[in-house]
Amino acid sequence: MAIDQAELSTEQVLRRDIPWETYMTTKLISGTSLQLLRRYDNRPESYRAQLLDDDGPAYVRVFVSILRDIFKEETVEYVLALIDEMLTANPKRARLFHDPSLASEDAYEPFLRLLWKGNWFIQEKSCKILALIVSARPKTHDGSFANDDSSNSKNKNTTIDDVLDGLVKWLCAQLKNPSHPSRAVQTSINCLATLLKEPKVRSSFVQTDGVKLLIPLISPASTQQSIQLLYETCLCVWLLSYYEPAIEFLATSRTLPRLIDVVKSSTKEKVVRVIILTLRNLLHKGTFGAQMVGLGLPQVVQSLKSQAWSDEDLLEALNQLEEGLKDNIKKLSSFDKYKQEVLLGHLDWSPMHKDVNFWRENITSFEENDLKILRVLITILDSSTDPRALAVACFDLSQFIQHHPAGRVIVTDLKAKERVMKLMNHENAEVTKYALLCIQRLFLGAKYASFLQA
């Protein structure tokens, strides 16, 4: 594919002079088509708008018949540019393709064929136009699409299922092996974000193994262009989070950690909103709740709640997610519960703190992830302003020193002593009591300190 074709713009294409008269003399277009084209071609937008209002279906018939009968690339590009311009100015005009007077025309076929046959300009325009036409098909009064499977028509027209399957195949092929270095992925995701609203597209997309093609695109974005791509990718995942077979795939892939990574670092409200709505949908499915707790989502939600979002849906979803995660924490083992308390900074006198068995059974678990939980416990001594949290943190450190064979050495190495010393002058009596206990343990060692147990 020559790069000049790839970089063609609609404006450039529409400056061309197409020899419509020649097409008529060679019987490729009819006299009526020629008259309509002469009236429409090279006219100002407002004049064209009036023609489409008066006689829209007739123009659509002409455009579709040219794409069906004429294969010259310049002309195909030109007609696609005309249709694209007409639909960009007013997307509702896509309904013209479903006008009853066009029932015998196979309006989908040319675009579906051009997806695979043309250069990038032709492919991109065909994809965009098809997606608009498909989304504009008539709905029944209950909001579902009318049965438009043309099976009652004498000709074997392309059915809507053929179109949706063909579109999904093309979109997945573009995500795997883009025809254009920068635009193919963006065009495909943009199109999917519209089409995945349809149950038929969701099932076709999952069967074509499309879900795994979205996952690499869920990563933190900085430029305007990449933020839009990320947003539309997350929109696709949100739409798939309503569809059970897709949820099964999302559960066994890296989707969840990636979504949480993005939501942690994103400041774009629309991105945060669509991810939080997705997580809320997934929370009660399978093992997602437990995975979310393990990936630190409760802390992320807490941090997001402290930011000033304006979107009501987002605030409501954050509250629901927080409540749902609390329920999941209740089901955890005692050490996992303890971890959540520490990571959230919500230290309180829950039973496990003063339960000797808890410390005996879980003391080696503190060594996981390079002593992460112990390190966080020590930072609470610096960062928390809550006297209860400070008192509990001092008490827990004293328990770690007592129960871990190398407790004193580890706590000393992590520079906890200086922090606890400061707390011995705290205005709250509970804080000073447990700060003192901790210091005694550090200096006296477990054997003697056990006599001082508060």
Image (cartoon, rainbow, N blue to C red):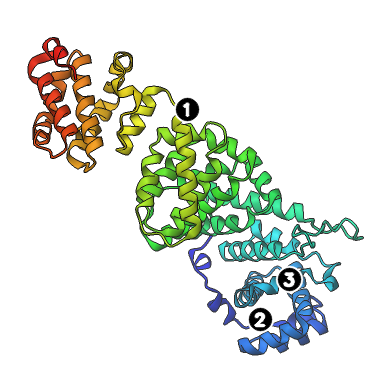
Q: Residue at x 20, y 42 (%)?
A: 383
129 and 78: which one is in front? Answer: 129
Q: Residue at x 8, y 16 (%)?
A: 444
The quadrant holding residue 408 is top left
Q: Is residue 433 left or right of residue 59?
A: left
Q: Is residue 95 visible?
A: yes
Q: Is residue 8 left or right of residue 62?
A: left
Tag 1 residue: 331
Tag 2 residue: 18
**Residue 433 screen position, x and y as percent:** 15, 28
Mark 2 or 1, nearer chain start: 2
Q: Residue at x 50, y 44 (%)?
A: 279
Three-letter amino acid code at the position of disc 1? Lys
Q: Residues within 10 Å of mark 2 (few under 14, many from 20)?
A: some
Q: Quadrant of the N terminus?
A: bottom right
415 and 227: which one is in front? Answer: 415
Three-letter amino acid code at the position of disc 2? Ile
Mark 2 touching mark 1, by CB under 8 A? no
**Residue 253 screen position, x and y as percent:** 50, 35
Tag 3 residue: 95
